[in-house]
């Protein structure tokens, strides 16, 4: 008789608790049989599992090359097993963003980089001696929470002076 070692995340389950996949090992192979797709069914079962993340982490640590573990295929596990870029970098923020994760360090660093880029764009908008200000400059000032400059406000007024009004306020007042 062959005995398999029980992974630590399964051993941590309370007595009598079973995972949705208990006794259904045939569903967790990566090869489809017939018209049914056991991969999709296995992923659906994993979605309801209370130890999904622990299972996926276990498979990634052990380098499991077959089957669905924690709702992840071997290819998806391989992507997650790659070393992550350091937090606080743009690549680190993208890594968290693509995984749907939240990291305060990355979020704050990304916000600071975005603010710096917007300030540079605003300085570029204000450099143009012939224009002095622009609608883009006005919008950047508002986005950055800065007071709007006279030249950018004038550019905005000039832009909207030539635009037709939607007339919604006029129709409402007339009714």
Image: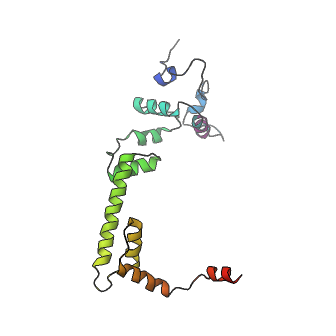
> x and y percent of residue 118 in the render?
34, 66
> x and y percent of residue 94 in the render?
39, 52
Residue 42 inside the magenta-drawn segment: yes
Kindly identify the residue that appears in the image at 50 percent across and 14 percent down: 3
Colouring mode (rainbow / by chain / secondary structure / one colour): rainbow
The answer to whether residue 150 of the structure is visible from this angle is: yes
User: Depth check: 8 or 40 in front?
Assistant: 8
User: Depth check: 38 or 150 in front?
Assistant: 150
> x and y percent of residue 157 in the render?
45, 83
Per the picture, the main secondary structure of the magenta-coloured stretch is: helix
Kindly identify the residue that appears in the image at 45 percent across and 38 percent down: 77
The answer to whether residue 64 of the structure is visible from this angle is: no
Vertical order, 115 against 13 (above or below): below
> x and y percent of residue 19 in the render?
59, 27
Horizontal side, residue 175 vs residue 49: left or right: right
Kindly identify the residue that appears in the image at 32 percent across and 76 percent down: 125
In the image, farthest residue toward the bottom: 162
Vertical order, 107 against 157 (above or below): above
Residue 80 inside the magenta-drawn segment: no
Segment tinted magenta in the rendering? 40-45
User: Depth check: 26 or 86 in front?
Assistant: 86
In the image, farthest residue toward the right: 175
Q: Quadrant of the C terminus?
A: bottom right
Q: Quadrant of residue 37?
A: top right
Vertical order, 145 against 125 (above or below): above
Vertical order, 104 against 160 (above or below): above
Q: Quadrant of residue 147?
A: bottom left
């Amino acid at each position: 008789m062959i005995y398999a070692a029980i992974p630590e995340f399964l051993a941590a389950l309370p007595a009598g608790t079973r995972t949705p996949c208990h006794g259904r090992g045939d569903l967790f192979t990566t090869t489809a049989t017939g018209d049914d797709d056991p991969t999709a069914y296995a992923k659906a079962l994993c979605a309801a599992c209370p130890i999904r993340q622990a299972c996926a982490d276990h498979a990634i640590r052990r380098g499991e090359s077959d089957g669905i573990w924690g709702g992840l295929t071997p290819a998806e596990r391989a992507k997650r097993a790659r070393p992550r870029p350091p937090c606080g970098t743009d690549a680190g923020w993208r890594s968290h963003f693509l995984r749907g994760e939240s990291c305060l360090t990355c979020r704050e660093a990304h916000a600071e980089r975005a603010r710096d880029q917007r300030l540079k764009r605003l300085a570029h908008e204000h450099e143009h001696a012939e224009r002095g200000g622009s609608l883009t400059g006005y919008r950047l000032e508002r986005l950055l929470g800065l007071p709007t400059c006279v030249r950018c406000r004038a550019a905005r007024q000039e832009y909207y002076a030539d635009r037709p009004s939607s007339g919604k306020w006029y129709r409402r007042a007339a009714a």
